Image (spheres, rainbow, N blue to C red):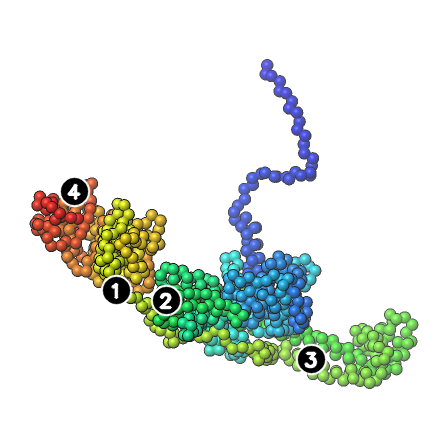
């Protein structure tokens, strides 16, 4: 019989709803698509619609909440208050940390200097937009209020010009947009990165924007570029104006604007003072790049550079070496440093809750439509108020006919609740009018007071008629907007800060660097070390220092202005100039080419070619016995490219590369010990750099081409023995007399 099972002791069950999570520890499969839809998409939409992209009034939600809070605090026409106080009040609308709110205020402030027309009048250290390391003071030390231009942002906001919504905890109301009286969306720069999209709006001059808007309202076919010249950056600078590129930005809302720094030359101190920089960089980035260029030897005209930014504003001073042309140096720095940069435009704006990339014309048309609606709502609000007042005064006018009767009705009414109904019956007025009459003070129950009040009826009727005509006529609404824009131009317009430079004013050809030309000896070793030695230094000491096992494989007399082509073992060629290398001595190892030219890890330099005019051919000898003949001009580039890929064929390992100014004979030797004299004229040139070439030496299985050298007279005693009429050929074994002494060296 099987053994009886013992009853295991029952484990005490956990009490219900006491720390036990239902389903804890279970692995539940979930489709990635549903996860994205339920978790990621709401986040992405929130970032796009409620955080990163500006709306037609030119503000993101964080900007709008901050400015509206300051407006409600009475900081438009009042003394400044501590920034910490503003930040604390803003948290009622913007439920984020105080640091994020304060950062927003800093970027809108006058002290930060990032906006053409700052919205926050600041006092204290607010940092500078052009400095990466200049930190702003904490909010408890600084003070702020709204700048006067904010009057145009909040004008008539209390007259139902825009919609209001509840804040995050439903305790306050906040505007969805600000009823800006000018196209602020184009006046101040605005950048933001959302999820899957971004926005980058460059700033324009306020006067030009308003004039363009006025012209567009008068003539929908107006040429935008005729009044809106170009962007206007708060840091100044020089804009390289190209009409076609600018029109592309105006038309599509996308494109680039090239901006370069402005400078002045102090001849007495022999220095250059940079006083404005592109908006996309900082002082520190510029200084670091120029120092790096000096260390690399690419810029040799600079003695010192320092940041002299102070109370007078931005200033970077560059001390020059004696005899340096400052203008030529600046042209060089424009090409090689962030002193010239491109501001990328992407006019991505939320229109009715939908992100849209708009050109300037479409953006202004949307703003005009928005502003027309604001003015219509304001007009309707004023009309309703005046109609209500007229209605009350018309009731008062009825009372004027018999004041004593009104008094008698009031006195004769026993209950207070019956006063209004009795007045309505006695004078034929409605409840609102009767309520108004019943609330008149006793001291005002005289004919003079009532006559003065009723005299406003005619004026009110005239104003109501005007407001109704405005609502019925869209052209009158536009006239009001145009009038307001003209007032904005008159009050806040200011000259351009960014200069325009036209291509005709620039030098068409890039200035060539003045490289001293003098004779040099160039050496290249098997391990990839390079030396540039002057003849004088070589005469003093000609014994070359090399690493153990290394040897010189290439020696040539050239000049300091020649080009160098270094071929690597990964079918690439790296281009450099002899002037890029410093003069050295034979007693040093020299420059390690893979490190100097930035080759990849493990990549080795195989061969060096020297040229000045890219004339002649390059001969590529491969282990499989093939020879490729490529014109040297195939490696010349119009742009200053430093690396070319697919420089030669990768079908067989490369043995060597030889430069051939003209066709001649070359001596090849194989691992089988055979020699072959080949004339390069028998091989046709191919313009494709990666050509496999043609077979010139036939090799038996297991053997390969070992080397090739340019044939010189007296290298062989019987050269005809190794020549052939047809290619490819196997070559001949060396005759006994060829191996005697040191005559034959490969």
556 to the left or right of 154: left
Alpha carbon separation for disc pair 1 and 3: 90 Å
**Inter-mark Cα distance, 4 to 2:** 56 Å
**Mark 1, mark 4: which one is toward the viewer?**
1
- Residue 425 in the image, given as x and y percentages of width and height: 85, 76
Q: Quadrant of residue 513?
A: bottom left
Q: Which callout, 4 or 2, points at the residue further toward the start of the chain? A: 2
Residue 281 vs residue 331: left or right? right
- Helix, strand or loop for disc 4: loop
Q: Which residue is mark 2?
A: 301
Task: Please name whichever residue, 307 or 208, is drawn nearer the observer in this view of the structure.
Answer: 307
Q: Residues within 10 Å of mark 2 (few under 14, many from 20)?
A: some
Cβ atoms at labels 1 and 4 below 8 Å apart: no
How far, Cα to Cα, is label 2 from label 1?
19 Å
Taking the spot 49% from the left edge, 67% from the top edge, the residue there is 308
Residue 509 can be seen, yes or no: yes
| Mark 4, other Cα within 10 Å: few <14 / some 14–19 / many ≥20 | some
Residue at x 38%, y 60% (from the top left corner): 295
Which mark's residue is nearer the viewer, 4 or 2? 2
**Pointer 4 residue:** 672
Q: Is residue 645 left or right of residue 682?
A: right
Q: Quadrant of the N terminus?
A: top right
Q: Dot 1: within a 10 Å radius of its alpha carbon, few (fewer than 14), some, or many (20 or more) residues?
A: few
Task: Point out the tag, 2 or 3, that comes first from the N-terminus.
Answer: 2
The residue where tag 3 is placed is 464
Where residue 206 appears, x then y in whole percent? 54, 75
Q: Is residue 678 left or right of residue 655?
A: left
Q: Nearer the viewer, residue 159 or 94?
A: 94
**Quarter occupied by residue 174:** bottom right
Can you tell which of label 2 and label 3 is closer to the viewer? Answer: 2
């Amino acid at each position: 019989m099987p053994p009886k099972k013992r009853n295991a002791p029952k484990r005490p069950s956990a009490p219900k709803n006491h720390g036990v999570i239902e389903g804890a520890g279970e692995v539940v499969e979930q489709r990635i698509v549903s996860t994205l839809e339920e978790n990621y998409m709401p986040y992405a939409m929130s970032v796009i619609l409620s955080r990163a992209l500006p709306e037609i009034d030119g503000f993101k939600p964080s900007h709008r909440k901050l400015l509206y809070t300051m407006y409600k605090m009475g900081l438009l026409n009042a003394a400044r208050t501590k920034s910490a106080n503003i930040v604390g009040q803003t948290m009622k609308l913007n439920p984020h940390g105080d640091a994020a709110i304060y950062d927003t205020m800093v970027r809108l402030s006058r002290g930060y200097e990032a906006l053409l027309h700052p919205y926050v009048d600041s006092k204290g250290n607010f940092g500078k937009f052009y400095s990466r390391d200049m930190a702003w003071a904490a909010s408890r030390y600084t003070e702020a209020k709204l700048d006067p231009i904010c009057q145009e942002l909040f004008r008539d906001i209390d007259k139902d010009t825009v919609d209001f919504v509840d804040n995050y905890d439903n305790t306050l109301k906040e505007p969805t947009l600000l009823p800006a009286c000018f196209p602020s969306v184009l006046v101040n720069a605005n950048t933001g990165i959302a999820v899957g999209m971004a926005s980058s709006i460059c700033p324009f001059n306020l006067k030009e924007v308003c004039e363009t808007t006025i012209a567009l309202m008068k003539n929908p076919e107006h040429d935008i570029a005729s009044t809106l010249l170009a962007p206007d950056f708060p840091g100044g600078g020089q804009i390289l104006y190209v009409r076609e590129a600018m029109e592309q930005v105006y038309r599509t809302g996308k494109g680039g604007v090239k901006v370069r720094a402005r400078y002045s030359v102090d001849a007495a101190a022999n220095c250059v003072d940079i006083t404005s920089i592109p908006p996309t960089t900082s002082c520190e980035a510029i200084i670091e790049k120029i120092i790096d260029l000096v260390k690399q030897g690419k810029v040799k005209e600079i003695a010192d550079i320092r940041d002299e930014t102070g109370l007078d504003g931005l200033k970077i001073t560059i001390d020059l070496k004696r005899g340096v042309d400052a203008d030529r140096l600046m042209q060089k720095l424009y090409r090689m440093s962030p002193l010239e940069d491109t501001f990328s435009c992407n006019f991505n704006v939320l229109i009715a809750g939908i992100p849209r990339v708009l050109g300037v014309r479409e953006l202004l048309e949307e703003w005009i439509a928005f502003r027309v609606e604001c003015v219509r709502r304001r007009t309707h609000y004023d009309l309703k108020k005046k109609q209500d007042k007229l209605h009350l005064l018309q009731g008062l006018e009825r009372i004027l006919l018999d004041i004593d009767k009104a008094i008698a009705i009031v006195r004769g009414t026993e209950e207070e609740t019956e006063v209004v109904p009795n007045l309505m019956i006695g004078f034929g007025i409605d409840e609102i009018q009767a309520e108004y009459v019943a609330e008149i003070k006793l001291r005002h129950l005289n004919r003079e007071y009532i006559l003065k009040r009723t005299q406003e009826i005619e004026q009110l009727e005239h104003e109501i008629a005007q407001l109704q005509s405005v609502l019925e006529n869209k052209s009158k609404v536009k006239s009001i907007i145009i009038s307001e824009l003209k007032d904005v131009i008159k009050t806040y317009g200011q000259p351009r800060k960014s200069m325009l430079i036209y291509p005709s004013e620039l030098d068409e050809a890039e200035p060539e660097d003045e490289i001293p030309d003098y004779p040099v000896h160039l050496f290249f070793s098997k391990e990839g070390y390079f030396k540039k030695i002057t003849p004088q230094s070589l005469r003093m000491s000609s014994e070359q220092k090399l690493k153990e096992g290394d040897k010189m494989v290439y020696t040539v007399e050239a000049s300091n202005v020649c080009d160098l082509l270094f071929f690597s073992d990964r079918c690439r060629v790296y281009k450099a100039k002899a002037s890029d290398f410093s003069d050295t001595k034979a007693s040093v190892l020299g420059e390690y080419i893979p490190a100097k030219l930035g080759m990849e890890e493990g990549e080795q330099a195989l061969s060096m070619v020297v040229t000045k005019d890219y004339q002649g051919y390059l001969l590529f000898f491969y282990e499989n016995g093939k020879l490729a003949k490529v014109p040297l001009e195939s490696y010349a580039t119009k742009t200053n490219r430093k690396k070319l890929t697919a420089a030669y064929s990768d079908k067989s390992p490369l043995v060597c590369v030889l430069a051939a100014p003209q066709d001649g004979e070359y001596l090849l030797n194989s691992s089988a010990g055979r020699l072959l004299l080949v004339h390069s004229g028998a091989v046709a040139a191919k313009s494709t750099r990666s050509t496999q070439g043609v077979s010139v030496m036939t090799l038996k299985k297991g053997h390969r081409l070992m080397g090739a050298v340019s044939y010189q007279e007296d290298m062989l005693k019987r050269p005809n023995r190794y020549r052939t009429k047809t290619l490819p050929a196997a070559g001949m074994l060396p005759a006994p007399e060829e191996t005697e002494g040191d005559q034959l060296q490969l």
